[in-house]
Image (cartoon, rainbow, N blue to C red):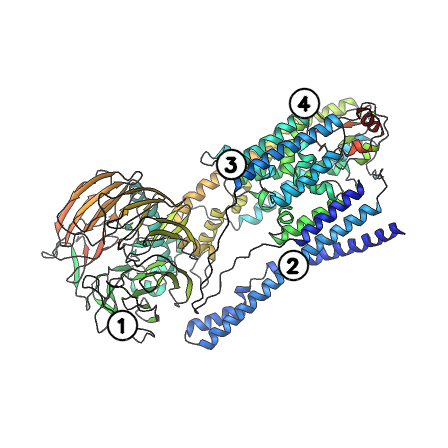
Amino acid sequence: MRKAIFRNVAVVSAIFVASFAIMLITNYFQVRSFNPLQADVMETLKKINDENANNVALQEQIRQLDLMARRAYFVNLDHLKTGIYLLLAMLGVLIVCLRFYFAGEKDIPGKQIDVVDDWIIKTHARKYVGWFASALVAVALVFVFVTASHLRGTDAPNTPSTDIGQIAAVGDESTAQGESNVNQANQTRQGEENTVQGNSDDNATQSLTTIDNASDISSGFRGNNSNAISSAKNIPDVWDLKTGKNIAWKSAIPKHGFNSPVVSGNKVFLTGADESAREIYCYDLRTGKLLWTLAATNIPGSPQVMPKTTDDTGLASSTAATNGKQVCAIFATGDLLCADMDGKRLWAKNLGVPDNHYGYASSLLAFGNSLIVQYDNTNAHKVVALDMATGNEVWSKTRTDKITWSSPTLVFANNRAQLILMGNPAITAYNPANGEQYWRVDGLSGEVASSPCGAGGLVFGASEYAALIAVDATSGKKLWTANNYLPEISSPVATNENVYLGTTYGVLACYDAKTGALKHSHELETEFYSSPMIVEGRLYVFSNDGKMHIYTADSEFTLINSFETGAKTFATPAFIDGKIVVRSEEGLYCVATKK
Amino acid sequence: MKRILSIITILFLGFLASTTTYAQDRFPRPDFESGYQYPATHYAIPNETLWLFVDVFLLVLMMGIVAWAVIRKRTRKPVFWVSVISVAYFGFFRSGCVCSIGSVQNVALALADKSYTIPLAALLFFILPILFTFLFGRVFCAGVCPMGALQELVNVKNYRIPRSVSAVLGIFPWIYLFLAILYAITRTGFIICRFDPFIGIFRLSGDIGLLIFGALLLLVAVFTGRPFCRFMCPYGALLNLFSRVSIWRAKITPSCINCELCHKACPVDAIRAPYNNKVKESRVQGVKRVLLYTIFLPVMVTVAALMMRSMSDSISRANNDVRLYDMVQGEATPKDHPVPELESFYGAGGTVVELKERVDVILADFKLYATFAGGLIGLVIGLTLLGLSVKRSRKSYEMDDAQCVNCARCFSYCPQNKIIENKIQ
């Protein structure tokens, strides 16, 4: 009787397990093939929303749908998981019942299904192995045939014009990274941009990987990734505003600002502001003609009275950023404004009027389609990533650091991009895609205005009266500190071997990147606000008096050229192939070797 | 004994049912503009060093116990309890990691790539079972390996698979092993860990497909002995080799009365019945076959090597960089909704030139190592055919040392062994 019960339960549970397993497998493939975020309805609604960004009801509808889709997906997933545990539980019941059913049958009668003759078994086995080998060959052939059509082309893509040799010469991982961001920005640049570029119409139809001018963009403060290393080539090494030597054009800038120019294709962007208006300017790189101006007006939350700023900061110290599709700018009022490449306003918002005793000065950083904003003020401490096209928040992270004026930098280390932010008291690395904190190293103090830099897997940051700190970007460990010469406003730049910086009291210093030992220092009896840039293995840096100093970016750190340009310069120039775009105190000018 | 086994099984299942799932699904979070702050994710860092010492200590201790029980005492009880402890500790408590099966990949990668430092625990988990196998046979498989132990514990009936079929299925672990090594040394991934069918059960979390697969494998293990160990386990393939030359090993009871009970009880079909070699073909024909396979062996190795070489491009697509490069190549125009991988690649500062350089190196590695892997697969098939062409006669029951997993089940069935046990006691 007892045995019969176990047998019956075992049979029922076996049927349950078998049928349930089939259902689970079917359900598994159904759930797997469904992506809740790419439902057709959602895609359509999002498209409509892109075209009409102010439809609050629609946005709410999208949110609700999104929530429902996610909820449905996870409920499905939960059901599936519960089903699996149920399956395992029933399997347990089956095993237990079988055990009780067979209890006492010590000599389980193994069903002898093999023929007695060992040789016949082997003969069969040989035959099966032969079939198996043949099947293996057939499967391999089918596999090769099926996958061959999907295989990549054997030709390498057209190498971007970026001088790889030069990158190797600089020996800097970050240089390559800079180049890549250029690539990315180039790739995202669409037909509208190409129609403006006379020589790149074909680009619109080219594959992303074959756009050949990879160094015609300088996307933000200190170039791409804000890492002060440019992959531009054929850079002039002498010019003079007074004589016009190598000066392609000069233009006036309507309003004052200390921000630096950024370049995308044939467009130069910079900003200016005064009590009456805050504006983005777009110039033609080829002619210097002002193409359009966009004012930051009608922004909810924008202050009627301008916040107080010091003369050497002003309302427009933050450099704009572009990804080749949009350009964004921020002002000391907290007004953040984004436009397309033709000057059409896309969105604008006020991030909260910053309480900042000098004036807000952190520059923007373009990371793919995201705009990174470091917003460390007395009344707000955060870093946010916004969608450049819509202004929607991608992620946001509250910070514990005190007020800072430095700008975010992207460094590629440990096989991943790291968003490096200076702060007081720490340098912090984040995942630029989601804001996850990678590491944090204390050691800064005072008024942190200088921005970080990275090379060869190391990150460097410095603040005056504190230290120059080197951090292993893989482990997040502090490697060394040095304090011989420290920057105040100008930011350092690094190669695999050396770290270079300029101080407010006029010293250009070169440290060993691995040990922190001071290798060279040049006392120039001037001031450095502008940050040094490394281009073609040379270090370019403006002193405030408008003198350009060019050094070898190697361990010798020898002077190549030093000359008066003819105008005081505080901003950091933008380098693109064959050209330098400089914002001086007198205006904007472009340097290009005249043929 | 059966009753205890049942209770243990019930306890395990109770444990399974009462444990919470910690699986995570990753989707882009919804866009909020409400000022909502996502809480920071915190990961607790466990004190691993201490546990690794415990792991290695238990590994050695349990293999020692099994060796003592099987070779010295010829009894199953300690093996059973080792199985229970192994499933509980190495399986559920330590979540199936570190495991010797996966350590093959660490060792392969360490040998191929000097920049890779193999964790000491992984190295010990690789070497120690091999050392014990060389000394005492597959004592690790007996019950120390949580996967083998789990299958052993759920096994109720022992329906046999025809030996001719299991001879073919026995080739799979080798193929799996060579592919795992290939993917490990090309830094493509640790496929053994990724597709571990039991890890989801031990962790009560993970890929749902693998969980289902694990459950089905357990279901099969109820009716036939250790399907994973015999037809899938790549580490088992390695131990199979060392077990053939082990110094001390489990043996059929010396005073065997040919009762056949051990043969029937063996869950992995590792006991060969007596066989009087009734030759049904001429000796010349047999010699010819062996010669033919011997001559054919290098051809099979070459063909398999060339096949795998020609497949190297295709199988390299499992590599993230190669797949990414394919996506970059296939991307004709920027899309409205770009592929996340591409967005991430470009966003992270990747360049196509750099990627191409990396991919070229990976493809070259795949070509080289896939050729070796193919050659080895050809060699295994060839040697299997050769092994199946040799005639042997047996006067009494014999252990197949390569297949025997030292579960000691045969001892508990052997009437002669009872006499020996009583004598020992």
| Inter-mark Cα distance, 2 to 4 | 49 Å
Label 2 environment density (alpha carbons within 10 Å; few <14, some 14–19, many ≥20): many
From the image, tell me which residue sits under label 1.
A295
Q: Earlier in the sequence, mark 1 or mark 2?
A: 2
Which residue is located at x 83 percent, y 37 percent? A112
Query: Does residue B54 sit above or below A11 in this rendering?
Result: above
**Whole-percent x, y for residue B265 in the image:** 80, 36
User: Looking at the image, is mark 4 or mark 3 nearer the viewer?
Assistant: 3
Label 3 environment density (alpha carbons within 10 Å; few <14, some 14–19, many ≥20): some
Tag of residue B119 = 3
From the image, tell me which residue sits under label 4.
B247
**Whole-percent x, y for residue B127 in the image:** 58, 30
The residue marked by circle 3 belongs to what chain?
B
Q: Amino acid at mark 4?
A: Ile
On the rendered structure, is B321 left or right of B248? left
Mark 3: which secondary structure? loop
Q: Is residue A521 visible?
A: yes
Q: Amino acid at mark 2?
A: Leu
| Inter-mark Cα distance, 1 to 4 | 86 Å
User: Looking at the image, is mark 3 or mark 2 nearer the viewer?
Assistant: 3
Mark 1: which secondary structure? strand
Comparing A231 with B272, the one in front is B272
Q: Are marks 1 and 2 on the same chain?
A: yes
**Whole-percent x, y for residue A478 in the image:** 35, 43
The residue marked by circle 1 belongs to what chain?
A
Mark 2: which secondary structure? helix
